[in-house]
Image (spheres, rainbow, N blue to C red):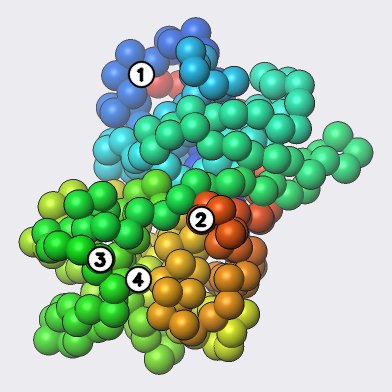
Amino acid sequence: MKFEFAKMHGLGNDMVLVDDREERIKDINGFAERILHRNTGVGADSILIVRNSDIADIKMLILNIDGSEAEMCGNGIRCFVKFCIEKGILNKTEFTVETLSGIKHPKAVVENGEVIGIGVNMGEPKLDCADIPVAAEGEFQQKSLFSHGRRFTVTSVNTGVPHTVAFVDDADLTDVEYYGKDIERSPIFPKRTNVDFVQVIDEENIIMRAWERGCGCTLCCGTGACASAVACILAGFTGRKVNVHVELGTLEIEWLEDNSIYMFGPAKTVCEGVFYDYE
């Protein structure tokens, strides 16, 4: 069976997008593993599948490279918005997107028919351990967590998916895979966790390196940028507007007065083609 696709990325976090409003894909988990394989498939961190929605303008399914389904993807929703507009799936720049973490409200900036930037209200961050989840009570902020004998100061936040922000002196000298893989599967996180290693530069700027649950090391994580900003604001390290610097650029994050998080950043199309699924 043949499937048209686009490969896109949000600051290096790459993904494959497929319009499946006709629901031709029956086994989405197996399909995700096949198309995302970097040797025998298209290759990417995740796949975003377009489906019709009964409660929003459109629905976004998110699957990781290991076939697991994710509740939300911050870089992904920006790519999803660009894909839907430029493919004519939706003929407007503001619409609603159904995800497993609720309905999101993106807004695209369009110049000469091209989407050059996307802002998304990501909703309110969840701070209670029961909502993240963390096997503890209350809020999990500025706590000690040990990995491979090293002590990290961490804060856990759910920004659509669970995140644990670990503060470090130098993000680029931190072995993200070594510690991220271990922290992700710590018994204190019953549904595992994404791990964001954050270096604070000043009151407006931080550096983030990401380990994503179900994906591994990625060049950027949108929900992680939101969680990192929230963790820094809660700790008093930054103001409520934070530039989150990743390897290929910057995401602008603001924790609004209504308690919602606003994210703005780019999305780029890499290539388009046809995937032949022989399974």
Q: Earlier in the sequence, mark 2 or mark 4?
A: 4
Which quadrant does the N terminus fall into?
top left
- Which amino acid type corresponds to the residue marked 3 in the rendered image? Glu
**Marks 1 and 2: in contact by CB < 8 Å?**
no
Q: Between marks 1 and 4, how big is the CA–CA gap?
A: 40 Å
- Which amino acid type corresponds to the residue marked 4 in the rendered image? Val
Q: Residues within 10 Å of mark 4 (few under 14, many from 20)?
A: many
Q: Earlier in the sequence, mark 1 or mark 4?
A: 4
Q: Residue furthest front?
A: 258
Q: Secondary structure at mark 4?
A: strand
**Marks 4 and 2: in contact by CB < 8 Å?**
no
Q: Position of residue 142 (x, y in %)?
A: 29, 79
Q: Earlier in the sequence, mark 1 or mark 3?
A: 3
Q: Position of residue 224 (x, y in %)?
A: 43, 60
Q: Which residue in the protein does label 4 denote?
A: 165
Q: Residues within 10 Å of mark 1 (few under 14, many from 20)?
A: few
Q: Which residue in the protein does label 1 denote?
A: 278
Q: Position of residue 127 (x, y in %)?
A: 32, 59
Q: Between marks 1 and 3, how big is the CA–CA gap?
A: 47 Å
Q: Residue furthest right?
A: 112
Q: Earlier in the sequence, mark 2 or mark 1?
A: 2
Q: Between marks 4 and 3, how big is the CA–CA gap?
A: 13 Å
Q: Residues within 10 Å of mark 3 (few under 14, many from 20)?
A: some
Any mark on residue 259, and which? Answer: 2
Q: Between marks 3 and 2, how big is the CA–CA gap?
A: 16 Å
Q: Residues within 10 Å of mark 2 (few under 14, many from 20)?
A: few
Q: Position of residue 152 (x, y in %)?
A: 25, 83
Between 253 and 248, the residue placed more toward the observer is: 253
Q: Between marks 2 and 4, how big is the CA–CA gap?
A: 19 Å
- Which amino acid type corresponds to the residue marked 2 in the rendered image? Asn
